[in-house]
Amino acid sequence: MAPLELMILKTLDAGPNHGFGITTHVQTVSRGLLDVEEGSLYPALHRLEKEGVLASEWSTTPAGRKARLYRLTPVGRKRLAKAQEQWAETARGVNRLMRFA
Amino acid sequence: MKPEDQWRDELESHIAMRAERNRAQGMDPAEARRAAGRAFGNQTQISENVRAIRIPEWLDQLRQDLRYAVRGLLHAPGFTLTAVAAIAVGIGASTAVFSFTDRILFRPLPYADEQSLVWFGMTAPLADSEFLLSWDYDIWRKKQTVFSVMKSSSGTVDCDLAVNDPIRLRCASIEPGFLGLFGLMPQIGRDITVEDDQFGAPPTALISHGLWRSRFGENAAVLNQTIDLDGRPVRVVGVLPPNFELPSLADVDILRPQQRDPKERGASFLHVYDRLKPGVSLVEARTRLEPIYQESLKTVPAAFVKDIRFVVNSLRERQVRDTRRAAQLLLGAVALLLLISIANVGNLLLARAAGRNREFALRAAMGAGAGRLLRQSLTESLLLSAIGGMAGAGLATALLRLFIATAPTGIARLSQAALDGRVLLAAFAVSLLAGLLFGLAPAMQRPSLESLTGGRVAGRRRQWLRPALVVTQIALSLVLLCGAGLLLHSLWKLSNVELGIRTESLLAIHAQLPRQRYPERAQQLAFWEAMEERLARLPGVSRFAVTNSLPPSGQAMATIYASMEVDGRGRVAAEGVGGMIVIRQVTPGYFATLRIPIKKGRVFSEEDRRRPDSVVIIDEALAGRMFPHEDPIGRRIKSGDTGWMEIVGVSANVRNAGLERASDPEFYMVKRHNATDGRLANTAILLANPAISAAVRDEFRRLDPRLTVQIDTLDQRVGKLQSRPRFQALLLGGFAFSGLLLAAIGLYGVIALLVAQRTPEIGVRMALGATPGDVLRMVLSQAGVWLAIGLVLGLAAAAASAKLIESLLFGTTPDAPAPIAGAVLALSAAALLAGWLPARRAARVEPVQALRYE
């Protein structure tokens, strides 16, 4: 599971959001440490939607702009839970490796 | 919203939000927007990536291929138009012809269980179709053991329906149960019953659906209505179903019961249709009917016997007999045309592929896989086939309409021919297959990188295929052209048949007096003599004649030669030898009106018409036959019960059995003022002034307003006799012309490509001193070689297919030199022109420019 996917799923776990919202959310929450590239974000969003992990619909933002909102499907929630677990293990492993080396 | 547009909106909305954020952070609006766009990086690349996810790959590639194919076709409009036209002609013509012949040859007859239906009877020169004689018909019925049902009808005859506007109709009489034999029944009303058929029963009739529609407004009130038919009140009891047709395929408007007089001993001809008992074959039926036939033959006058045959046919066989040959010829012709058009399209595609060798090599070098390239060229040829197929469907509809409109009458069931969906589909499939095949051929070979250098490397191996296709086209076109040439030659011969009469500016007026209103021969004579007087008084009538039939059609009175006698010599021939003799009764003006020369003796005079004994004029053919060594003038002859007639003159021969058959010998009896002579009710008048047909009609109306009169020019009548050969020649001519055109296009395409490929070489040659004339010769000689091979093959094929066309020819044979030479010349001229155009271009090549090409 690529980190990009995890970032997308985790962001959407907080509630439906549009592509731009996802980039800003990741930046804000990681306090600028993580960045999502638009060039990879959209292909990933569309692929995830095709896989049934996400669903999308057109809606209007509070600022009155039309935007495509993505949200997690039940499949997505399961995928997120699994991804989180995997990521935690990976992180633990990497941490141990770093300490040991 | 399409995925494409959705994605654009999504992108747009993202950039807008980013720009807003940038502005909020203090950037100026223009910069904010630019920065937002920049953040996105390469938008096209992203869009491609997104689309690749959204759309299944094959669909996307198909779309690309299609777009590419459309663009490619639009870039080469000449190629596209020619290829589409070639496919359309192939599909259109073959679909139309198949639909048309399918109706004639293969469609089920509109009768129940048609396989067991039979038409049998005797044939004789006097009758135009099989018959049994009415006097022993009942014996046949009782003795036969092979049919479960056996029914008869009369042939069709003219009959006049007198309403406000009298019309002439076709009537036939049938036995009760006739419709049932074919599994039919009246659409409304009832069938003719056994009671209706009793001799002396009140007359009843069934009317055709067409008549019901045109004359009675499809109103059911027609039932039990009484109509005036031939001056007799007849009660309508039923209406025939819309698709009803007589098994003889003759047009018919009214069916009546036969009401045969049981005491009558005269014979009438009956058409006899039957249903075979289950398990009885045609051969068996014929064998088991033979003894009854031999029995029946004994009742036939001895003079006729030798000319009579006995035939048993399935109804279908019998119906398609006359049209089969023409239909087969058409099928053959259209198959050739289809082959030519396929070869042509293949050629065009191959030529185009060769021309694009460099482009394909470039694409391969850029990473397009072999599969991708293959698919691309396939897409293009399939697209071409699809467009061509659609154009072909349109063409087929138009052609079929043209066929039906121009076809002569008497082709069975032609009017019902409709475009057949299955046939169209099949033709379409053939063209798709051809597209697939020829799309495959050029793509099979992966273009080598060498062709990028501009040399002629790739495609060398296939050089034989295109010339082979051209040669094939030339050969097939020659076959078509030969066929068309032969038919045109026949038509020309037919329209130049020596008729023995002059038909120009003659009005032919024909009427038949209804027997019911003119029952006595004296009344009939009185009518025609009164009419003769009236018409002779009309202004502007210089030449004028009354006759009981008109040449050159074969519808005259006739007798058999064996019945003729010469005074003092008896019968002129042994029984059953000698064929038919035509008899015509004419007024003295007949020979002058038709410009028939009198070779010996004199023409009839008005005094002859008052003589108690008839005088005759015989034609040279009869004179040669009856009096080979003596002077016929003054001799007396007799035919059957005519009494002795003195020969007063010998006339030139006149064509009297139609245009295609050899004429029969003929003698003319003077039309006397005497009601005992020959046929009176059925009379024609010839008038040498076509401008007064309205006045003629008025005279008839004054004498009998209810009489139906047909007036046309003699030229029109003769023209009708040529309608069938004209139709055949027209059709085959059209095919041959299309084939010629396609072959020329094919040759042009290949030579043009050759010239393009050899441009550098030509440049070198010219730089080394070759003149434009040399170049022209070089290119043309190449075309000449192909033409020569094609011609030789074509002539061989034409000779091999000659049998098919032989029976349709008149006055010419399949090996007649003139039409074949004409076909070869036409094809050679077209081919050389097609080769000359690119050859001239080659001759104009600038050496320097051509060398730079390399």
Image (tube, coloured by chain):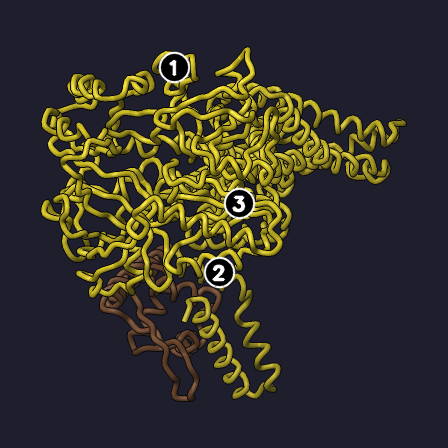
Chain colours: A brown, B yellow
- State the residue in front, B86 or B717: B717
Which residue is the site of mark 2? Answer: B698
Q: Secondary structure at mark 1?
A: strand
Q: Mark 2 vs mark 1: same chain? A: yes
**Mark 3 or 1, nearer chain start:** 1
The residue under label 1 is which amino acid type? Arg
Which residue is the site of mark 3? Answer: B686
Q: Is residue B366 above or below residue B480?
A: below
Q: Quadrant of residue B307?
A: top left
Q: Is residue B510 left or right of residue A86?
A: right
Q: Secondary structure at mark 3?
A: strand
Rounded to the nearest whole Å, what is the CA distance between mark 3 and mark 1? 35 Å
Rounded to the nearest whole Å, what is the CA distance between mark 3 and mark 2? 16 Å
Q: Is residue B19 above or below residue B325?
A: below
**Mark 3 or 2, nearer chain start:** 3
The residue under label 2 is which amino acid type? Asp
Which residue is the site of mark 1? Answer: B571
Position of residue B597 measured from the top left corner of the image (x, y, whole percent): 61, 30
Q: Chain of mark 1?
A: B
Q: Is residue B761 left or right of residue B645?
A: right
Q: Mark 3 vs mark 2: same chain? A: yes
Q: Quadrant of residue B704?
A: bottom left
Where does the N terminus of chain B fall, quadrant-wise? Answer: bottom left
Rounded to the nearest whole Å, what is the CA distance between mark 2 and mark 1? 48 Å
Q: Is residue B328 left or right of residue B194?
A: right
